[in-house]
Image (cartoon, helix red, strand yellow):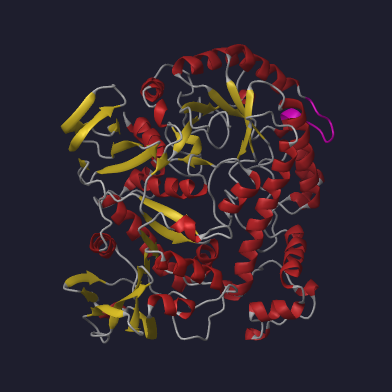
Amino acid sequence: MSKIINGDNLTLGTCYYPEHWPKTMWREDLERMKKTGIEVIRIAEFAWSKIEPEEGVFTYEFFDEFLDLTDEVGMKVIFCTPTATPPAWLTEKYPEVLNARMDGVLLRHGARRHYNYNSPVYQELSARITGKSASHYAKRDCIIGWQLDNEINCEVDVFYSESDTVAFRRFLKEKYGTIDALNEAWGTAFWNQTYTDWKEVYVPRTTISDSTNPHEVLDYTRFVSASARRFAKMQSDIIRRYLKPGDFITTNGLFVNLDNHAMRRESLDFITYDSYPNFAYCLDMYSDNPKNLRDRKWSRNLTETRSVSPVFGIMEQQSGANGWNTRMEAPTPRPGQITLWTMQSIAHGADYISYFRWRTCTMGTEIYWHGILDYSSRENRRIREVHDVYEKLQGMQELAGARYEAKVGVLKDYDNIWDAQLDVWHQRVDEASQKALFEAAQRTHTPLDFVYLTETTTAEDLTGYSLLFYPHMTIVTERQAELLKQYVAAGGTLVIGCRSGYKNSTGQCVMDTLPGLLSELTGTDIPEYSFIAPDAGTVTVDWDGTTIEASVFADLLEPLGDAKLEGTYTSDYYSGSGALVCNSYGKGKAYYYGSAWNEMSAEIFLQKLGAANPYRDIVTVPEECEIAVRSKNGVRYLFVLNYEKHPVEITLHRKGTDLYTGNEIEGSQTLDGYGTMVIRL
């Protein structure tokens, strides 16, 4: 059982950098953390030189001295591998470890994450520092877990070094076997791109008009993910040789061009996320549109995290203003927002919350990335609020390990995510629908899961959801199509959006009638399709007397067999053409919707399909609030989160226990601006 994600405890931590502060401050900091309610610290993710100041010279005294002190104080420690920032001696002697831009220019020492995963030298030196750190420090009682690297694929998620080209060729040889098979998969007959030898194949390079072979780029993205996962697994395998019982391995953040689900299965005990809702208020991107979800939209990222680990940790939770000296200017959290964002994380499944950072750094790029304390360490309202969070958690310990409840899911898979990154047609519909479905679920108080179709997903994994959306399943495999058939046949309701079923796993368009492998399940034929033209005006759909607005794209549909045409377009030249087909399949139903979603149309789908606001009989809350429910051993825990600065009224329709106070409550309740409630039902 993990020492923090264990089903027994809700725990607070913080990120601490002893190398940034005089040793005379260490004890006072640790004791002050303990008084505040902080029980765990994360250290060492950028401290390679403190362990290996010169190549092959290892000195353990610095962290030994610090860890001796944590033992005395009773502070638990998450130790990190320091591979996110290779030291200057390393990059100077071995420039081949550096990442490069697409045009070949090396990314030099002076920032972070400037290495590449595929350099044999970097792999060797990273394995050595990981092994030396783990073999020396892992046995210490204060250490309870390990973080691999830091924010894998953050800063840069593309790699163009010579080592990457060598590794990419090896990746492709293993996948395709022959150069002829590669040519077929990549469609190299187009624009005379045919290869005759593996040495002609490179990672994507600078071309005219930024045009690259999309099938190559899809495989390249898979390669980047595989490279990052292999780098993580190399470290994880080494550390596991030295782990004490109950100690864990994790890494932090969720970044692109990375199959986080596979990395979790291969290398981690659970994922941790870095949650910065204050990004919503960054001065260069903030809009005070009343329909803007602002910090509430961070629940979408937490939903992604929960799809990787149903119960997870937060390694970096917002505690102060954001900002580097180069970008990301954001204000200090208002009174109550640290609590709000902490409870937002816990509502979605976090049992461990570590605030970034203990004290604001006085040097370097992150001098404006504020922590709990400011530069002076003086007492402030933020540290008082963190202590108040700790006090609240003492009444909430029973919900540790509880699972988030959702009966509605949005299906995803990495091939389609990556295809939407490189294909602007796919990207336009997907961005619109993903945003709309999440925001509609939030505003209708409909808890939502993201459900990934991975190589290990079974039909049983889907049957807990009464309603599943796959907004735009452009790439479809036979295995995925069979999974969806099994889900619907067992009684599920599936909704598929436009631009689905027209590509295979290489990213090439199929020559089948559309929607290809989804035709049988959805009972749909698509004889024609088009982007909605700019001069088309508002394109509407009549769904059994309800008018909804189509967005971005229009597949013109015809039902097959016994499938029913439930909605038709009512404007532009395709007025009267099919827009929504419903097909009964086994015990369930599959819908094909010929457009992308906007928030209004997404709300109508949730309402018409009986999924909206499933807790209406328990609580009534205004639109400003998010609700979430975690359940454990038959007991439900209701979170109500107010993201507005003004008070709101909520109504509990049954008795519950306020876990902050222990009092029984029912009926009308006032929730302060940025206020939260956690209620045992």
- Quadrant of the image containing the C terminus: top left
Q: Is residue 180 left or right of residue 8?
A: right
Percent from the top left, x then y, of residue 199?
A: 80, 72
Magenta segment, prevailing SS (helix, strand or loop): loop
Occupied quadrant, residue 142: top right
Tell me the residue at 38%/79% (across/down). 523
Q: In this view, does 628 lie to the left or right of 92?
A: left
Percent from the top left, x then y, of residue 467?
A: 35, 60
Percent from the top left, x then y, of residue 181?
A: 72, 78
Q: In this view, does 249 lie to the left or right of 31?
A: right
Occupied quadrant, residue 239: top right
Q: Does the magenta stretch include residue 396?
A: no
Query: Is the residue 47 above or below the residue 109 in the image?
Result: above
Task: Name the outermost residue toward the right.
Answer: 56
Q: What stretch is highlighted in magenta?
A: 50-59
Percent from the top left, x then y, of residue 677?
A: 28, 32
Tell me the residue at 41%/38% (across/down). 345
Tell me the residue at 73%/59% (across/down). 164
Query: Is the residue 584 above or below the residue 127 in the image?
Result: below
Q: Which of 681 and 375 is in front in this view?
A: 681
- Quadrant of the image containing the N terminus: top right
In this rendering, does residue 30 appear at all? yes
